[in-house]
Image: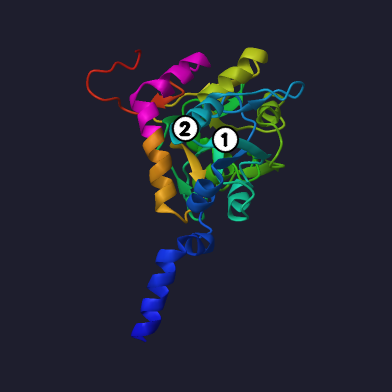
Amino acid sequence: MRSNLLTFLCLLFIFPHLVMAADNSVYNHVLQSGVLRCGYVNYEPWFMRDPNTNKLSGIFYELTELIGKKLSLKIEWTQETGFGTFVPDLQNNKFDMMCSGGWETPSYAKNSRFSQPAFYMPVYAVVPADDMRFDKNLSLINTPDVKIVTLDGDIAGMIHDEDFPKAKLSSLQNMTDFTQVMTEVATHKADVTFADLDAVQRFIAHNPGTVKIIKTKIPVRLYPTSLIYRNDSPEFDNMINSALRELIFSGQVQKILQKYKTDPTSYLPIAQPIGRSQKD
């Protein structure tokens, strides 16, 4: 028994790559290849791909590219996914990280891991501009004659199940552009959805007078917004968080948010070290 152990230790010392090859964690894969494969969802302004030029842009596009530079990794934008499918895609090794960001929810966390938040985002109810029924009492949404619209697997469906289960639920296909959800509300095909302020304000800018935000004193939800990856490697988690923290505390995240002209009430920043202003 002792001789077998000594033989194993000798082999481990002489051929460490054999042990590395047996480790198929995301951390080992990324270190060996020098490439971080990214999944992404087209969701303005988090991540955008120009259909004509294929040029990439967005808050998380720039943030992930900076993380790659910090870690000396090449970022490869591998595959488009959806908010309802990215967790299975991660589990099936279609990419290493969901790099266009996502909200930290228990349903996602069951089978994946979140980085520390890049920022926080409040979520509010959105209704047709001329609908006054719920302005003073959101609990009135919880009736069978109200229809909530969502994308398959998105947070509006979760909010329906937890807070307004008596309302009807209409789900659009997972890969549908989120503006279609807003259009369903704007055209009275649905009564309510739930979304972040930035998404709603961008829709209103192109479609004035169509929908409105019921901006309650306390938002319907407040979500940490993070990068997401498989829960198989604390080393990978530590590596990503180290780079992300440096970008937060150096003010780079705030500069990216300002570049994309985000509403300060839509993206709530992580508290900065003493002496740094959020406007710096």
Which residue in the protein does label 1 denote? 75
Q: Residue 11: x, y in percent?
A: 44, 70
> Is 265 above or below relative to 108?
above
Question: Can residue 197 be seen in the rendering of this structure?
Answer: yes
Disc marking residue 215: none
Disc marking residue 67: 2
Question: Which residue is drawn at the image coordinates 50% and 14% (left, top)?
Answer: 259
Q: Amino acid at mark 1?
A: Ile
Question: Which residue is drawn at the image coordinates 47% and 56% (left, top)?
Answer: 232
> Is 277 above or below relative to 156?
above
Residue 187 relative to residue 231: left or right: right
Query: Which of 129 and 100 lies nearest the eye of the viewer?
Result: 100
Quadrant housing residue 267: top left
Question: Can residue 129 be seen in the rendering of this structure?
Answer: no
Question: Which residue is drawn at the image coordinates 50% and 43% (left, top)?
Answer: 228
Q: Secondary structure at mark 2?
A: helix
Q: Amino acid at mark 2?
A: Ile
Q: Main secondary structure of the magenta part?
A: helix
Q: Residue 216: x, y in percent?
A: 43, 26
Query: Which of 190 and 178 lies nearest the eye of the viewer?
Result: 178
Q: Which quadrant would the N terminus be assigned to in this image?
A: bottom left
Q: Estimate how packed mark 1 is, as few (under 14), some (14 to 19) or many (20 or more) residues with alpha carbons within 10 Å.
A: some
Q: Estimate how packed mark 2 is, as few (under 14), some (14 to 19) or many (20 or more) residues with alpha carbons within 10 Å.
A: many
Circles 1 and 2: CB distance less than 8 Å?
A: yes
| Of pointers 1 and 2, the one earlier in the residue sequence | 2
Q: Would you say residue 62 sits in the magenta stretch?
A: no
Q: Tell me where the magenta segment starts and ends, as one range.
A: 244-264
Cα distance, mark 1 to mark 2?
9 Å
Q: How is the image coloured?
A: rainbow
Extreme-right residue of the structure: 52
